[in-house]
Image: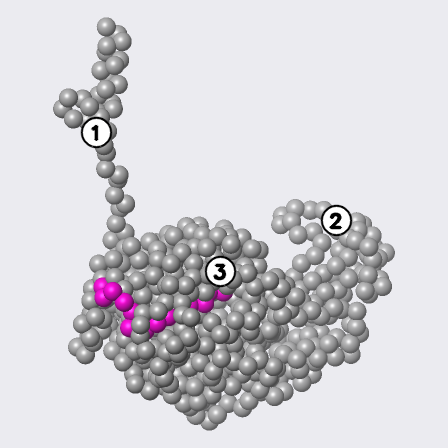
């Protein structure tokens, strides 16, 4: 009797999971994934003028609205895969994941290239390549980076950096106007803008069967390591990229500021400075020693600090290296005048909040804009040696101290000249023993704005109601550069404008970037990408539509040459 009762009880429990009237267990449908409930238009006040758009473009727009939850989930899944180039964490897995994206897009050729040892002696991370032939007369080269920076202060994040959680802007300390932003490492730099592109490509194909242009996509895993692997790939396999007629960069809006067509790049070199007791001939010469000996032994660590202090003036911002700012190309009167006009409309408090700083070096908007667009920098990115355990003790007198430095330079400066001047400064001030090591270099590059791909971005800005600044000059200018613009990227490998490395032959491509959408806090805690827009800033759905529009704009233009027949040979 008791056994029967238990059996009946067990059957009842099992049948709660789904039984027929006879008590037979039936198949249970898997639980549907709950919808994110993303509002495609959020709280946007700006609207897209679709009156002159082709029906194929409108169909892609409708598809984006209907599938925006799925598109946001695509970004969440990518954020959940770490891809930290400096440590190597997740890099092989990420390369495979990115290749899978391109396979799903339907590209006929997808391949992961092991680039091996690079120009500066380090092993490069894999480059992912794809070629997608849509039978179109034009071919766009799409540049991606799949690597991100490490997470240095996880306790400062409002959500785990590799979760991809959706939070409101106020919770994230960004802007209460944004009801949904995605928090995660790589959200804005650069998985958010890139997944926006991929979702747009997928939407066009789902709605219309094919893209209006062919695509060549190259995704590097070393952007945060000076693009050393991409340098090796492009210089070794230029034939894979030459079929492209232009390059479209990923991008986004500048928040409340007018947009601009991107494409130029500042110069960026990265060095390490190392002080050792061995090279100095004082202090510990074999290894770190017990800190008790500081009473009678010299310290390489203090020597390193004194050396660093000699490199910068008392303001902590101006390099004290003789001739450091020589060769800078003067700012044109037109650029200066436009900066003054822009300064009158600039809210430094909002800019500072977006970056995550208390204030800028100057409280004058004009000065800040000038620094951001045409300034140079000698930064300390990190310093280490000895006892590195936070909160712990342990007496150590370090034998070796190393500091990392990023140096940003502009036309007509060059890294070879700067490296010589740094060496001469150290020698002159008694630091001949300090080692200077070049980790990598990205020369500056400029771009031509009077091109089909640049005009396709400008047309999108107009149709989407996004205010934008026209370039001061149509050719060879860095006018598009600012702190929320292109900054430093390996444009010198692709551009048709001037570039700062006479030893590099660029591919000569038209380059332009810019889109709807917005994000911030790159390299910082609570990096974010706006999912639901607000005011004149589009959310992810609007950002995807801007990419769709740029492709159709570019495809409709007449002046670009046809795609070489070698595209997929």
Q: Nearer the viewer, residue 341 or 24?
A: 24
Distance Cα–Cα, label 3 vs label 2: 47 Å
Q: Within 10 angstroms of label 2, few (less than 14), some, or many (20 or more) residues?
A: few
Q: Residue 112: which numbered mark, if any?
A: 3
Residue under numbered circle 1 = 26
Location of residue 325 by image quarter? bottom right
From what the image shows, is residue 550 above or below residue 299? below
Q: Secondary structure at mark 2?
A: loop
Q: Residue 395: which numbered mark, if any?
A: 2
From what the image shows, is residue 298 above or below residue 231? above
Picture quarter with the N terminus = top left
Residue 216 colored in magenta in the image:
yes
Q: Secondary structure at mark 3?
A: strand
In the rendered structure, the answer to whether residue 438 lies left or right of residue 267 reads: right
Span shown in magenta? 207-220
Q: Percent position (x, y) of residue 169?
A: 35, 59
Q: Within 10 angstroms of label 1, few (less than 14), some, or many (20 or more) residues?
A: few
Distance Cα–Cα, label 2 vs label 1: 68 Å
Q: Within 10 angstroms of label 3, few (less than 14), some, or many (20 or more) residues?
A: some
State whether residue 20 appears in this view.
yes
In the rendered structure, the answer to whether residue 312 lies left or right of residue 256 reads: right
Distance Cα–Cα, label 3 vs label 1: 45 Å
Q: Nearer the viewer, residue 394 or 442?
A: 442
Residue 116 colored in magenta in the image:
no
Picture quarter with the C terminus = bottom left
For image coordinates 25% across by 78% down, the residue present is 463
Q: Percent position (x, y) of residue 223?
A: 52, 66
Q: Nearer the viewer, residue 479 or 284?
A: 479
Q: Nearer the viewer, residue 173 or 285?
A: 285
* C-beta proximity under 8 Å, tags 2 and 1: no
């Amino acid at each position: 009797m008791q056994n029967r009762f238990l059996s009946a009880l067990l059957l009842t429990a099992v049948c709660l999971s789904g039984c027929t009237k006879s008590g037979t267990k039936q198949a249970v449908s898997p639980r549907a994934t709950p919808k994110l409930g993303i509002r495609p238009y959020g709280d946007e006040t700006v609207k897209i003028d679709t009156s002159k758009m082709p029906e194929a473009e409108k169909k892609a727009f409708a598809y984006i609205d209907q599938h925006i939850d799925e598109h946001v989930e695509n970004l969440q899944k990518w954020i959940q895969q770490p891809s930290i180039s400096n440590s190597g964490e997740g890099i092989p897995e990420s390369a495979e994941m990115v290749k899978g994206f391109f396979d799903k897009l339907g590209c006929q050729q997808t391949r992961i290239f092991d680039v091996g040892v690079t120009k500066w002696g380090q092993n490069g991370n894999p480059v992912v390549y794809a070629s997608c032939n849509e039978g179109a007369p034009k071919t766009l080269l799409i540049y991606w980076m799949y690597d991100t920076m490490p997470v240095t202060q996880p306790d400062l994040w409002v959500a785990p950096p590799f979760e991809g959680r959706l939070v409101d802007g106020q919770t994230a300390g960004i802007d209460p106007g944004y009801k949904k932003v995605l928090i995660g490492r790589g959200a804005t730099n650069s998985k958010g803008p890139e997944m926006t592109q991929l979702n747009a490509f997928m939407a066009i194909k789902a709605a219309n069967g094919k893209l209006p242009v062919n695509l060549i996509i190259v995704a590097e895993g070393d952007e945060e390591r000076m693009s050393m692997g991409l340098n090796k790939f492009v210089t070794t396999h230029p034939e894979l990229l030459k079929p492209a007629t232009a390059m479209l960069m990923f991008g986004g809006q500048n928040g409340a500021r007018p947009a601009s067509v991107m494409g130029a790049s500042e110069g960026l070199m990265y060095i390490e400075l190392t002080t050792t007791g061995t090279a100095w001939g004082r202090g510990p010469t074999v290894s770190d020693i017990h800190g008790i000996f500081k009473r009678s032994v010299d310290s390489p660590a203090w020597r390193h600090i004194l050396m660093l202090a000699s490199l910068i003036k008392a303001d902590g911002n101006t390099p004290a290296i003789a001739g450091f700012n020589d060769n800078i190309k003067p700012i044109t009167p037109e650029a200066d005048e436009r900066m003054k006009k822009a300064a009158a409309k600039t809210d430094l408090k909002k800019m500072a909040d977006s970056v995550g700083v208390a204030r800028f070096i100057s409280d004058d908007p004009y000065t800040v804009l000038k620094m951001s667009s045409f300034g140079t920098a000698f930064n300390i990115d990190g310093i280490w040696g000895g006892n590195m355990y936070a909160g712990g003790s342990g007496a150590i007198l370090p034998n070796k101290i190393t500091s990392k430095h990023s140096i940003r330079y502009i036309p007509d400066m060059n890294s070879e000249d700067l490296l010589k001047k740094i060496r001469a400064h150290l020698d002159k001030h008694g630091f001949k023993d300090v080692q200077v090591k070049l980790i990598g270099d990205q020369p500056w590059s400029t771009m031509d704005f009077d091109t089909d791909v640049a005009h396709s971005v400008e047309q999108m800005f107009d149709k989407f109601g996004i205010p934008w600044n026209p370039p001061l000059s149509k050719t060879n200018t860095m006018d598009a550069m600012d702190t929320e613009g292109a900054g430093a990227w390996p444009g010198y490998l692709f551009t048709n404008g001037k570039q700062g490395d006479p030893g590099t032959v660029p591919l000569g491509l038209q380059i332009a970037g810019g889109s709807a959408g917005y994000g911030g806090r790159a390299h910082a805690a609570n990096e974010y990408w706006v999912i639901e827009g607000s005011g004149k800033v589009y959310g992810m759905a609007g950002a995807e539509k801007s990419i769709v529009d740029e492709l159709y704009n570019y495809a409709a233009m007449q002046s670009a040459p046809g795609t070489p027949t070698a595209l997929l040979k």
